[in-house]
């Protein structure tokens, strides 16, 4: 039975059987732990992004948050070594008459030190300057023994044409980056998917930050090139796309649109068919992120299902004036449309496509 300060949360014998669990102390959720018969009680709410500590695991005397694995001492609430002055609230806990009693109010307060934000967390603001075009090549290859890539080659032609129009360009080849696959933080809880990506925040070696920086902060336009693999875009493209979940999820979790007044176009190249299927997926995905598209937003080439003589296909792409002209014209349409969106955003006179993005769910 509880008095004014102490709340009975259950039988000690029963609660001791589970090392870590969530209990309600009045209306306050608490992470109750028991190791070697000794109970501890700290806030259920993680300092980082509000993860449910009572649903985590124990590492010695530390409660490990199930979302991104921050650790807090189960008895004192203090952060793991290196973060000791960060702490979640701790509650008093005692066993009396075989019952576990926990103080309704914490005995030590929450404390969050200001940690330097990740560089990607800065406000999204277009810096003055010419139109900026990011090329992303999604063809996979052995970086130590590179081969000719038709999709990369056409992308280079497109970027050269963009520069000829006065644009700044950057090119990222996904095969040159080391980045992990999405590990499904969103599947733990919507708010467990963070911006920047939880992996980017936890793993300084992960190089997906280059894509985030380019797409979210730097570029006005994206030109993405991909080969067709088994009727789809490349596996590297899909790995990147899944890591861009965190950009799209910001709309869901924070009503925050991160991609505004940006244009995307595509180069699709296959030894075999399904150009429209691949282009359809690309258009649908980048539309979900907030990109707009120029007229005729992709170019493509395939010699068809029976063309198994890939060396001829490669030679064709390498030397085809028509295809490289197509890539150049795609770039000109892309730069032109990006210029209209940027100019419209600056004057407030949005072209139709840009206006729609401005009016959906503002942050
Ligand atoms: S580590 Fe707890 S919410 Fe991220």
Image: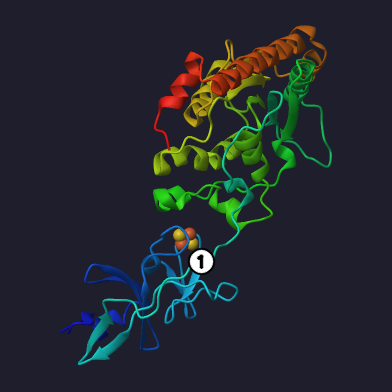
Ligand 1 closer than 8 Å to label 1 CB: yes
Q: Where 235 sits versus 196, above or below?
A: above
Callout 1 environment at 10 Å: few (<14), some (14 to 19), or many (20+)?
A: some
Q: Position of residue 11 (x, y in %)?
A: 22, 83
Q: Residue at x 49, y 49 (%)?
A: 194
* Quadrant housing residue 28: bottom left
- Residue lying furthest top in this view? 322
Left or right of 226? Residue 104 is left
SS label for mark 1 = loop
Q: Is residue 70 above or below residue 210?
A: below
Instruction: Please give left or right for residue 14 compared with residue 180 in the image.
Output: left
Outermost residue on the front side: it is 347
Horizontal relation, residue 305 to residue 15: left or right: right
For the C terminus, the quadrant is top left
Residue located at (48% from left, 37% from top): 248
Instruction: Say if 3 sits above or below 172 in the image.
Output: below
* Colouring method of the image: rainbow
Residue at screen point 57% across, 47% down: 121
Pick whichever, 104 or 24, lies toward us.
Answer: 104
Q: Position of residue 319 (x, y in %)?
A: 83, 12
Asked whether residue 238 appears in the rendered view, the answer is yes
Picture quadrant where residue 97 is located: bottom left
261 or 13: nearer the viewer = 261
Residue under label 1, please give it: 70
């Amino acid at each position: 039975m509880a008095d004014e300060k102490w709340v009975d949360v259950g039988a000690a014998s029963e609660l001791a059987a589970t090392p870590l669990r969530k209990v309600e102390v009045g209306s306050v959720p608490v992470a109750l732990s028991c190791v070697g018969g000794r109970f501890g009680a700290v806030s259920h709410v993680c300092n980082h992004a509000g993860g449910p500590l009572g649903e985590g695991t124990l590492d010695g005397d530390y409660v490990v948050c199930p979302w991104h694995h921050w650790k807090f001492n189960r008895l004192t609430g203090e952060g793991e070594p290196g973060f000791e002055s960060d702490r979640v609230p701790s509650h008093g806990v005692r066993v009396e008459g075989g019952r576990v009693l926990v103080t309704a109010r914490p005995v030590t307060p929450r404390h969050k030190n200001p940690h330097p934000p990740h560089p990607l967390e800065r406000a999204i603001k277009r810096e003055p300057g010419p139109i900026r075009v990011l090329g992303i090549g999604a063809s996979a290859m052995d970086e130590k023994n590179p081969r000719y890539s038709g999709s990369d080659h056409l992308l280079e032609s497109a970027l050269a044409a963009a520069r000829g129009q006065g644009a700044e360009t950057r090119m990222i080849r996904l095969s040159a980056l080391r980045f992990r696959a999405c590990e499904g933080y969103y599947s733990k809880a919507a708010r467990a998917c963070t911006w920047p990506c939880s992996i980017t925040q936890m793993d300084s070696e992960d190089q997906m930050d280059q894509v985030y920086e380019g797409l979210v902060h730097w570029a006005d336009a994206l030109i993405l090139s991909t080969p067709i693999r088994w009727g789809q875009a490349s596996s590297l493209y899909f790995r990147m796309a899944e890591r861009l979940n965190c950009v799209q999820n910001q709309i869901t979790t924070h009503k925050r649109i991160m991609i505004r007044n940006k244009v995307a176009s595509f180069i699709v190249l296959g030894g075999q068919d399904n150009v429209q299927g691949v282009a359809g997926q690309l258009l649908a995905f980048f539309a979900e992120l907030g990109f707009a598209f120029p007229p005729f937003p992709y170019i493509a080439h395939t010699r068809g299902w029976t063309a198994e003589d890939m060396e001829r296909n490669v030679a064709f792409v390498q030397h085809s004036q028509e295809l490289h002209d197509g890539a150049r014209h795609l770039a000109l349409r892309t730069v032109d449309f990006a210029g209209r969106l940027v100019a419209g955003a600056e004057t407030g006179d949005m072209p139709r496509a840009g206006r729609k993005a401005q009016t959906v769910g503002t942050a």
